[in-house]
Amino acid sequence: MKKKQKIVIAVTGASGSIYAKLLFDKLVSLHEQIEKVAVLMSDNAKIVWEKELNNKDYENYPFQFYNKMDFMAPFASGSANYQTMIICPCSMGTMGRIANGISNDLTTRAADVILKERRKLIVVARETPYNLIHINNMKIITEAGGIICPATPSFYSQPTTINEVAITVVDRILMLCGLDADFYRWGEAQ
C-alpha cells in the first residue's frame, strides 16, 4: 500500500474557482490516500469563489485552513514533509513571485520549500493569453522542478457540462500527484 500523502493546496484570486471546488471535492473522496490537506486561500480567492460559484462552500471542507501570513504553518518548513503542493488556480502574480524567489506570504514560502526539497509543485496557471513574462516565469519554475499544468480542459471524454469540462483539468492534476481514482484515460475502455 502506498504511503498516504500530505498535500498543500493554495487557491489564488485568479478566475477558475470551479477548479478549486472540484479539486476539493475529489480530495474529500480520495481521503484513504491522503494523510492531510492544508489549504491557503487568499482574500481575493474567496471573493472570486463567491462571485463565480455564488456560495461560500469553501468554508465547509474538512481541511485545515491557514492564514496567508502564518509562517508557523508546518509546511513553511521542509521538516513537515508535505510531498505535494498544488496552486489552483494560480495567478500570474503568484507565479511571478515563486519564479523569482519572493517568499512574501505563506503560499510563496510553501512553494519555495517544496521546490528546495525537490518535492512536487503543481502550478495550475489560469490566464490567457500568456505574455513573454508569464512564459519565462513558467520556464523558470519548470527548470526548478515544478510542473506547469495550465487550466486547459480536454474534450476527448466528450464532457457535456461545465463541471465535466473542468474535471478533465482536476483529474490531470490528481494524476500528477500520483493519486489513484477513476480517471478518463485515452485509449482505455471506459
Image (cartoon, rainbow, N blue to C red):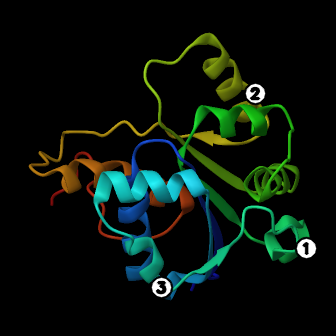
Give the residue pinned by disc 2.
Answer: 140
Q: Which of the two discs, 3 and 2, labels the residue nearer the N terminus?
A: 3
Q: Amino acid at mark 3?
A: His
Using residue 23 as the reference point, say whether residue 100 is left or right of it: right
User: Residue 95 appears in which quarter of the rendering?
Assistant: top right
Residue 5 visible:
yes
In which quadrant is the N terminus drawn?
Answer: bottom right
Other residues around mark 3 within 10 Å, as few (<14) / some (14–19) / many (≥20): few
When the figure is inspected, residue 42 is found, relative to residue 96, above or below; the finding is below
Left or right: residue 131 versus residue 120 is left
Q: Residue 115's x, y, as percent?
A: 81, 49
In this rendered view, identify the residue nearer to me: 84 or 90: 90
Which picture quadrant has residue 57? bottom left
Q: Secondary structure at mark 2?
A: helix
Q: Earlier in the sequence, mark 3 or mark 1?
A: 3
Q: Which mark is residue 79?
A: 1
Which amino acid type is marked by label 1? Answer: Ser
Quick check: marks 3 and 1 in contact, CB under 8 Å? Answer: no
Per the rendering, the mark at residue 46 is: none
Q: Which residue is mark 3?
A: 31
Quadrant (top left, top right, bottom left, bottom right) of the C terminus: bottom left
